[in-house]
Amino acid sequence: MKIKASLFLAALSVLQLATGAQVTFTDNQVYKITYTSSFNGKTPEGQHKIWVFAGPHQTLVTSEKDFSGNGSYPFELSLINRPGNRQELFAFLNEQESISASDTALRGQQFELLPGTKDILGYQCKKAKTVVNSNTIELWYTDQLPVKGAPTVLGQNLGLVLEQVRNGNNIIKAEKVEKQRLVLPGFLRRTAPSMDLLSYRDAIWKSRFTAIPLFRDQVINFSDTSKSTGEVLRFANGTIVVKKLRFPEIGKGSSLFLDLTEQSNGDAYDRTGTVFLIPVDKKQSFLDGLKNGAATLPVYTNGNGKKYQGVVATPGYTPPIELMRFFTPFGIKQYNHIRLKDKQWEEAVPYRQDITDFAAALSNREVWIGVFIGNYDRGGHRINATITLHRGGPDQPQQHIIPLFNTLNIMEMAGQEYATMFDNEKGLVVHFRLDTPLRNARLLYTTTGHGGWGNGDEFVPRQNTILLNNKIIFNIIPWRQDCGTYRLYNPASGNFNNGLSSSDLSRSNWCPGTVTNPFRIDLGNLEAGEYTLQVKIPQGPPEGSSFSAWNVSGTLIAD
């Protein structure tokens, strides 16, 4: 018998629930089983060993580090009450917050009992197998001890599980069994409000990252009565909303994600949308243009007779940084009353994009962030937007961010010119200077073509060519052929005689109801000095009052 005896000072410990009820650990004597994990025969260094305290009536499952109170938040422990065959779950979200829930799922566990035995730590163990979410789990358990338990919820009622094998290569195995009295540390006596299991799991999940709300239930519409309210500023007849936010420090091992959901609040059409950051590091900013009019922004010309306001960087001005470009579908939610056989319309369209590249522009500072949806409808669109900060990933070098151009006319409904500058050979030209060398530089380039009739550039593939100091660095025909995938987001999309819907049609790098991702163009290391960047697109000619345009944005990122 390989049991090491040790005594703790107390014989009774409790976990207290918010209701005032107490879950009492009544077993005087328990078996403490220490487990280690391995994968493909390798044991990770510094792993948190699993501790199981198994008594005749209760089993506590925790980890070595969490039980000592030194675990990383959030962490959990579970208490199996044998008389009721119930699992009590406790989560410690941070130093102040704890929650609890109950689960009876272990009652329904089913196992295939297999032949064969194996000796583990001197105990004869039997074998059982089950399948969970397509994973094959093999359990080796013994009934030579008067207690039951396991390092996970699986097999808690089989006996004392001393080894768990998942898919043949992920192993949790007992390395030591000791008999002792149990003392729960003081921090486990916290009040832990009880909640339903789904809410409990959701609270744990959300505690793992920081959510920074941008906009909540925000209407973006076209109305001459649109007014700024509180912290949300509205411009261009309500088609632009802007908010000032404070971001925490973002560590090198962190990731940032932008989430936005959209529903029609009256508008039936597919519209261009963008989430943008307004740099205020220069003498003039895009915010000045929002407040004082597009005509006050620096003008770009290329000889075609038009003036394009605020689209390129100058020594005294930085254009908006595009965090996400998205396209609304045809009337989601508002037009779900349109019935088609075998079509069950979605209620909202979700957009989610990794924006970690822009962390340095947000970290530990106050910033202006805005959302634009081009539309001419009094109801318009309704959005929710959040940025989430996820810590604990691999370290990444701090990024240097240089916004160069953004031709998307965010102030469309306040007179900002459409991006038609690609109708001549010159296209778009940006001059910029690097005062210091850049390492591992890349251009984040987002492009979408517009002109919504048969020969318009929305429906005609066009080659995009980018040159740096007269040398071609990028050539592509941006084109989306998967638009039919998103049909259930588009209840108001017109149906044609040939069996297609308008939302099915392929487009110049966008679909109704999707995000358009930027291209990452590797530039290598750049020396200090003067640079000229040129974007050329063979833009199609206008027909009557219809014309084509290309919304392109570019930001230089480097280590």
Image (cartoon, rainbow, N blue to C red):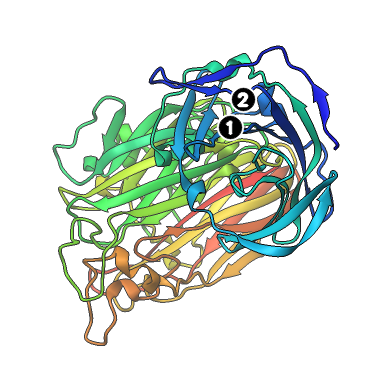
Residue for badge 1 = 58
Q: Residue at x 66, y 52 (%)?
A: 442
Say which of 450 and 57 sits in front: 57
Q: Secondary structure at mark 1?
A: strand
- Badge 2 crowding class, 10 Å Cα cut-off, few under 14, some 14 to 19, many 20 or more, is some
Task: First in sequence, mark 2 or 1: give its number.
Answer: 2
Say which of 523 and 204 sits in front: 204
Q: Secondary structure at mark 2?
A: loop
- Badge 1 crowding class, 10 Å Cα cut-off, few under 14, some 14 to 19, many 20 or more, is many
Residue 332 spot, x, y in % from top left: 25, 58
Q: Amino acid at mark 2?
A: Asp
User: On screen, 320 above or below 329?
Assistant: above
Residue for badge 2 = 27
User: On screen, 207 above or below 150?
Assistant: above
User: On screen, 309 above or below 195?
Assistant: below
Q: Residue at x 85, y 37 (%)?
A: 1
Residue 53 spot, x, y in % from top left: 67, 31
Q: Is residue 307 visible?
A: no
